[in-house]
């Protein structure tokens, strides 16, 4: 028996997301879980990825575990500590970013993300922090990764407010809006499933299920009917090696993730 | 110059105030404390990622409006006094993406009326109907590529900006170590700039290594030497953030009312200076720990 047999779905959510980052990718990393999954890729299989933080640091080696995008740990041995204009303008808007990696309070059927308000913008019931760099990442990256826990309230059919663009309202939504990347891959990683944009409909499709999770469980926790084509594959469980990297080199003190007892 | 002199002479009621720092790094705490002590009101706060200093100015009832990308303490949560003020309809807000805000400062820093952007297209950041003030953006057709929509965001030239940094000299030359977020563009766009710094350096040092100057003196009106001036947030190479204090602040900000007033009293109103707060509410033992932890991360 391996000491790493047991794992949590939060851990696998991070590991699975990290598998979609390749070596040499230029990746804009948002605050929170994207920092952990980005580090997982950097430490595990993408040592040459260019980790870029919106505050300005470029290609840091990143030491565990940053609690903020202003943390010294995301500036560790960087090649340049630039500015927002450098990272969001010179890298993202310039078209250099392979991946933008964000979280969000609400994600809808078109993979639009809301991190601004619940209710009316001018008289909101709940106010969230706002876009930050998330809108810029979703607008300009060639591929967008989104990570969030799978709860019904987080996956409404339509966001109350679109902060960061998915496919907006259908397959041609981004093209019609004039966004520079009209048809990006968008993947959503949760503790229940991996969903990916179906480019024919512009809607989220269940691509994979977490081990032991049923399609019905995903439907029960999703406020829209996701596209399903055939039987979704299971997410590959984390290898011992992946869990060791995650627990020893990415988040050894449990800042973001707790290993199961 | 002291913080009291700098703030007293440069920040006025009704000012548009640029806020430096980002989330939990180099946040303009000591200068915000001084603005609160002096009760300078009806402020419009502008910045990118505004956090605890903005939240305290809002919590002290001194802010009329914010224009920013986020109000955010990251893992500690949303800036709660700001959030409640918006939810209760007591604060005007205008949202942009961070690149949108940084582009507004960039336009201001170049003496241009606006900056084009390809961010925010297709989203409610543009669709929102804001009843307050002038139009927040314009959409044009790219003159060289018809059919290609481009967002124009208006230049932003703050009346005065506040920034906390590592080093500055008596002339006002500013060295920023680590990320610079939107601060260089914002400083150049501002009609006045107050910089608080951890250390005063000699102008000879600046002249012997001028490539390190992030903001030259011509933009800077006051330099206040204030070690720990970003506490409880971090200053790269000097100290890490004090998570315990940040969580205590957030707890008071979440509660509001008397609990929040008590935080403001103990942090700000009971002291004539920021040093008073550090000595009586934080203590040198805690500060030494924060400095030692930063040394392990460099």
Image (cartoon, coloured by chain):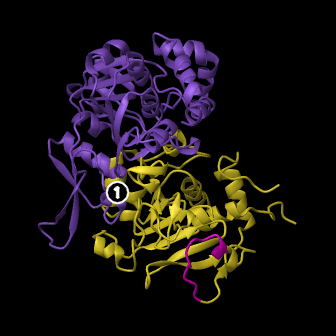
Chain colours: A yellow, B purple
Residue at 39% across, 80% down: A171
Picture coordinates of residue B276, whole percent (x, y)? 52, 11
Picture coordinates of residue B216, whole percent (x, y)? 24, 29
In the depicted view, which residue is nearer to us: A36 or B264? B264
- In the drawing, does residue A170 fall left or right of residue B268? left
Name the residue at the bottom extreme. Answer: A230
Q: Main secondary structure of the magenta part?
A: loop
The image quarter containing residue A55 is: top left
Residue at 42% across, 49% down: A123
Picture coordinates of residue A69, whole percent (x, y)? 49, 45
Q: Chain of mark 1?
A: B
In the depicted view, which residue is nearer to us: B256 or A174? B256
Q: Is residue A212 magenta?
A: no
Task: Using the image, determine if residue B206 lies above or below residue A114.
Answer: above
- In the drawing, does residue B239 fall left or right of residue B225? right
Helix, strand, or loop for circle 1?
helix
Name the residue at the top extreme. Answer: B272
Q: Which residues are magenta?
A: A218-229
Local crowd at mark 1 within 10 Å, few (<14), some, or many (≥20)? many
- In the drawing, does residue A140 fall left or right of residue A239? left
Task: Using the image, determine if residue B183 lies above or below residue A13.
Answer: above
Q: Can see residue A28?
A: yes
Task: Using the image, determine if residue B13 lies above or below residue B151.
Answer: above
Q: Which residue is mark 1?
A: B125
- In the drawing, does residue B185 fall left or right of residue A116? left
Name the residue at the left extreme. Answer: B143
In the depicted view, which residue is nearer to us: B114 or B170? B114
Residue at 37% across, 39% down: B180
The quadrant the C terminus of chain B occupies is top right
């Amino acid at each position: 028996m391996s000491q790493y047999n047991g794992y949590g779905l939060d851990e696998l959510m991070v590991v699975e997301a990290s598998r979609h980052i390749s070596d040499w990718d230029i990746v804009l990393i948002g605050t929170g879980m994207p920092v952990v999954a980005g580090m997982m890729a950097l430490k595990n299989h993408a040592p040459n990825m260019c980790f870029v933080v919106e505050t300005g640091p470029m290609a840091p080696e990143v030491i565990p575990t940053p609690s903020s995008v202003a943390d010294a740990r995301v500036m560790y041995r960087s090649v340049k500590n630039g500015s927002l204009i450098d990272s969001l303008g010179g890298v993202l808007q310039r078209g250099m970013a392979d991946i933008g990696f964000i979280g969000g309070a609400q994600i809808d059927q078109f993979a639009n993300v809301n991190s601004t308000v619940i209710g009316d913008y001018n008289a909101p019931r709940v106010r969230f922090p706002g876009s930050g760099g998330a809108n810029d990442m979703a607008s300009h990256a060639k591929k967008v990764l989104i990570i969030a826990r799978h709860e019904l309230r987080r996956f409404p059919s339509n966001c109350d407010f679109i902060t960061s663009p998915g496919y907006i309202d259908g397959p041609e939504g981004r093209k019609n809006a004039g966004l520079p990347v009209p048809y990006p891959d968008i993947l959503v990683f949760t503790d229940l499933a991996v969903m990916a944009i179906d480019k024919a409909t512009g809607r989220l499709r269940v691509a994979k299920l977490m081990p032991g999770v049923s399609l019905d469980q995903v439907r029960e926790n999703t406020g829209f009917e996701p596209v399903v084509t055939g039987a979704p594959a299971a997410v590959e469980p984390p290898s011992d090696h992946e869990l060791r990297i995650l627990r020893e080199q990415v988040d050894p003190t449990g800042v973001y993730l707790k290993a199961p007892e | 110059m002291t913080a009291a002199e700098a703030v007293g002479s440069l920040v006025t009621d009704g000012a548009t105030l640029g806020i430096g720092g980002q989330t939990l790094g180099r946040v303009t705490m000591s200068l915000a404390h001084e603005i609160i002590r002096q009760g300078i009101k009806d402020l419009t706060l502008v910045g990118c990622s505004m956090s605890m200093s903005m939240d305290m100015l809002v919590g002290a009832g001194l802010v009329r409006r914010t224009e920013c990308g986020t109000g955010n303490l990251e893992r500690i949560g949303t800036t709660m006094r700001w959030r409640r003020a918006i939810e209760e309809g007591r604060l005007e807000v205008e949202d942009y993406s961070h690149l949108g805000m940084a582009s507004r400062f960039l336009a201001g820093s170049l003496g241009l009326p606006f900056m084009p952007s390809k961010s925010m297209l297709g989203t409610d950041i543009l669709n929102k109907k804001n009843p307050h003030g002038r139009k927040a953006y314009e959409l044009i057709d790219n003159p060289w590529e018809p059919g290609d929509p481009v967002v124009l965001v208006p230049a932003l030239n703050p009346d005065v900006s506040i920034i906390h940094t590592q080093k500055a000299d008596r002339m006002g030359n500013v060295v920023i170590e680590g990320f610079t977020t939107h601060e260089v563009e914002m400083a150049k766009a501002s009609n006045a700039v107050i910089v608080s710094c951890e250390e005063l350096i000699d102008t000879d040092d600046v002249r012997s290594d001028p490539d390190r100057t992030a903001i030259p003196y011509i933009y800077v009106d006051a330099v206040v030497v204030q070690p720990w001036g970003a506490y409880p947030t971090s200053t790269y190479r000097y100290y890490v953030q004090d998570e315990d204090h940040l969580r205590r602040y957030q707890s008071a900000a979440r509660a509001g009312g008397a609990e929040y007033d008590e935080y403001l009293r103990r942090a700000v109103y009971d002291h004539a200076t920021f040093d008073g707060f550090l000595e009586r509410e934080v203590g040198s033992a805690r500060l030494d720990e924060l400095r030692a932890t930063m040394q392990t991360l460099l």
